Image: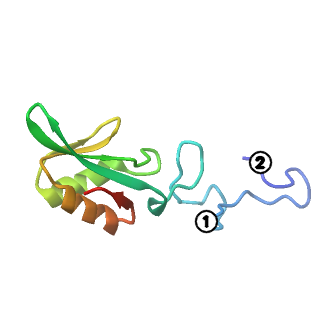
């Protein structure tokens, strides 16, 4: 990526607006457009749905590029002792686990609505 004043004696690398490190050394989570998308900037929406006669806790609103959804659902499955998966919409856990899921998301730094 070209830096500021590229090709001149005043050339500087592009830095992250959050951590101040160069863009190559930055480890801040970014969305698909390249903007910084921290957990506190995302709001998870927790809902209970009935599918095929069973209750399913659904979590929507998390950025799939900036958030490691597979690791998040793995920790929630362990916390709730239930099955779950990552879908195109977000996360699904078998059963009504709105309370524990909301607590886990809040402790991870996400904003939570519902649950």
88 on left or right of 13: left
Camera-side residue of 59 and 66: 59
**Residue placed under numbered mark 2 in the picture:** 2
> Taking 91 as reference, is 51 left or right?
left
Look at 12% across and 47% down and name the residue there: 95
Q: Secondary structure at mark 2?
A: loop
Q: Position of residue 64 (x, y in %)?
A: 42, 44
Front in this rendered view, residue 37 or 100: 100
Distance (Cα) linking label 2 and label 1: 19 Å
**Residue 59: x %, y % from top left:** 30, 48
| Above or below: residue 58 compared with residue 114 | above
Is tag 2's residue or tag 1's residue first in the polypeptide sequence? 2
Q: Which mark is on residue 35?
A: none
* Mark number, residue 18: 1
In this rendering, the count of numbered labels is 2
Measured from the top left, where is residue 42 in percent x and y? 45, 55
């Amino acid at each position: 990526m070209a830096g500021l004043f590229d090709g001149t004696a005043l050339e500087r690398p592009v830095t992250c607006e959050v951590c101040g490190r160069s863009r190559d050394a930055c480890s801040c989570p970014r969305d698909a457009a390249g903007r910084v998308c921290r957990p506190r900037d995302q709001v998870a929406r927790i809902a209970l749905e009935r599918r095929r006669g069973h209750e399913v806790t659904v979590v929507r609103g998390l950025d799939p590029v900036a958030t490691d959804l597979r690791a998040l659902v793995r920790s929630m499955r362990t916390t709730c002792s239930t099955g779950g998966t990552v879908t195109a919409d977000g996360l699904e856990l078998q059963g009504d686990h709105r309370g524990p899921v909301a607590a886990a998301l809040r402790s991870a730094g996400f904003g939570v609505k519902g649950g």
